[in-house]
Amino acid sequence: MAQYGDSSIHAVSQLIRNYHTDLEEFGVLAFQMRKPQKGSTGGRPRKVWHLNEEQTMLLLAYMDNTEPVRKFKKSLVHQFGLMKRKLYEKQVQFELGKEFSKELHQAIAESPYLDEHHHLYGNINKLIYQQALGVSTKALRQQRGIPKDEPITHYLDSNEAGAVKRVKEQTSTLLGMHFNYQQIKGALQVQGIVYQITLPAKQLMKEGH
C-alpha cells in the first residue's frame, strides 16, 4: 500500500498504529514478523500487516489524497463495479437456471418412460453436464470441491451456466417429444460438447480408472 500512497512503509505502519481501534472494527489486525533479507547488514525483524478489504479502504480514506492515492481509489471503484456486475450476471444466470430446472423436472415427471427407468432423474442430470461441459458431475464436484448437498450451478461461470441451460432446454424438448433416455443421448451427442472444460491431469487419471 505504501507505493500507492506515495508514503514510506514506516508512515503506513504508523498510520495503522494510530487508527488500530478504528481498523479493528472491521476484523482482527493480522500481521507477521518478517526477518531481514539474507545478505543485508544488521536490521531488526519488521512487522508486515495483512489488512482485509474493509481495513484497506478505511486506511486509504485516512491517507492524504496525493495523486497516487487518488489513482488507486479510482482503480478500486472500477474493480468493485466490475465485481458487482459479474455477481449480478451470475445471479441472473442462476435464477434462469432454476426456472429451466423446474421445467426439466416437470418434463421428466411426465415422461412415459419414468416407471421403466427408476434412475431417470439422475441419469438425465449426468447426461446434461456431460454434454454441456464434457465432464461428469462426479469429476466436476471433486475438481471444484462442491459439497453433495449444494447445486453444481452455484459453482459455474456464465459460459458454463449458459451451456448447461442450453442442454437443459434441448433435453426438455426431447422429453416432450416422448424420447427415451437412449434417444435423448443420441440426439444430444450429434451436436457434440457445447462448452468443453478441462480437468487437471490428475483428475483425468482418476476418471480413467
Image (cartoon, rainbow, N blue to C red):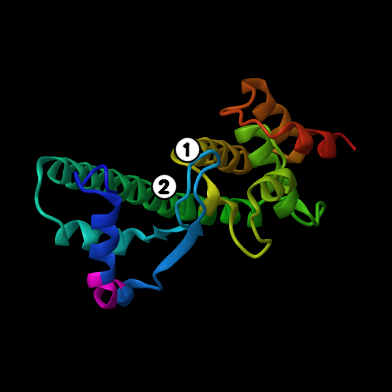
Cα separation between marks 1 and 2: 7 Å
Q: Secondary structure at mark 2?
A: helix
Task: Say if 177 sits above or below 191 in the image.
Answer: below
Residue 23: x and y, percent? 28, 71
Frontmost residue, 22 versus 102:
22
Q: Nearer the viewer, residue 112 or 40?
A: 40
Please state the horizontal and vertical placement of residue 69, each as a whole percent of the image. 16, 46
Cβ–Cβ under 8 Å for marks 1 and 2: yes
The crowding category of the residue bearing disc 1, from other C-alpha atoms within 10 Å (few below 14, some 14 to 19, many at least 20), is some
Give the tally of numbered discs: 2
Is 3 left or right of 123, judged from the image as shown?
left
Q: Bounds of the magenta span? A: 18-23
Disc 1 is placed on an element classified as helix
Give the labeled residue for mark 2. Answer: 93
Residue at (32, 51) in percent of width and height: 88
> In terms of secondary structure, what is the magenta stretch mainly?
helix
List x then y, in percent, for residue 200. 70, 34
| Residue at numbered disc 1 | 162
Query: In the rendered structure, does residue 21 fall within the stretch colored magenta?
Result: yes
